[in-house]
């Protein structure tokens, strides 16, 4: 938050793992203008979205396991959006 004197954990509150309140080697991060946090959760092979105030995320890409098909991810490294709202993932 603007003007904060200390940091706040907003994603991955429960340590390393694959539950929706965990991350496993997070790499890339994007925060939109609404405060929603997007994380490239590398070793879980997924992109996870945390809405502001939530304690667990929602998988938005990578729900179908590891692989090389368009609906799979294999160690995503970065995530971002363009000015049209299109999602880009470095995988």
Image (tube, rainbow, N blue to C red):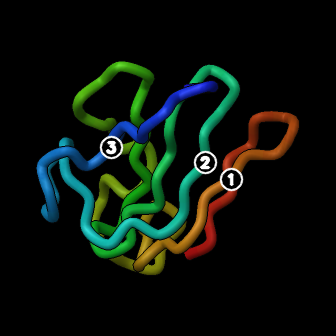
> In what quadrant of the picture does the C terminus appear?
bottom right
Rate crowding at label 2 as few (under 14), some (14 to 19) or many (20 or more) other CA atoms within 10 Å. some
Picture quadrant where residue 73 is located: bottom left
Secondary structure beneath label 3: loop
Rate crowding at label 3 as few (under 14), some (14 to 19) or many (20 or more) other CA atoms within 10 Å. many
Residue in front for this viewpoint, 73 or 51? 51
The span from disc 1 to disc 2 (Cα, nearest Å) is: 6 Å
Picture quadrant where residue 46 is located: bottom left
Q: Tell me the number on the disc at residue 11.
A: 3
Nearer mark to the viewer, of 1 and 2: 2
Image location of residue 50, percent across then percent down: 40, 34
> In what quadrant of the picture does the N terminus appear?
top right
Taking 34 as reference, is 73 above or below it?
below
Q: Residue tagged by mark 1?
A: 80
Secondary structure beneath label 1: strand
| Contact check, label 1 and label 2, Cβ < 8 Å | yes
Rate crowding at label 1 as few (under 14), some (14 to 19) or many (20 or more) other CA atoms within 10 Å. some
Q: Residue tagged by mark 2?
A: 30
Taking the image as shown, residue 83 lies to the left or right of residue 81, namely right
The span from disc 3 to disc 1 (Cα, nearest Å) is: 17 Å
Image location of residue 31, percent across then percent down: 60, 39
């Amino acid at each position: 938050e603007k003007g904060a004197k200390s940091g706040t954990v907003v994603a991955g509150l429960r340590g390393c793992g694959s539950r929706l309140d965990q991350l496993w080697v997070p790499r890339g991060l994007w925060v939109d203008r609404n405060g929603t946090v997007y994380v490239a959760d590398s070793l879980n092979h997924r992109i996870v979205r945390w809405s502001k105030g939530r304690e667990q995320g929602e998988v938005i890409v990578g729900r179908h396991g590891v692989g090389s098909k368009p609906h799979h991810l294999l160690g995503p490294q970065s995530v971002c959006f363009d000015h049209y709202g299109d999602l880009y993932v470095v995988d």
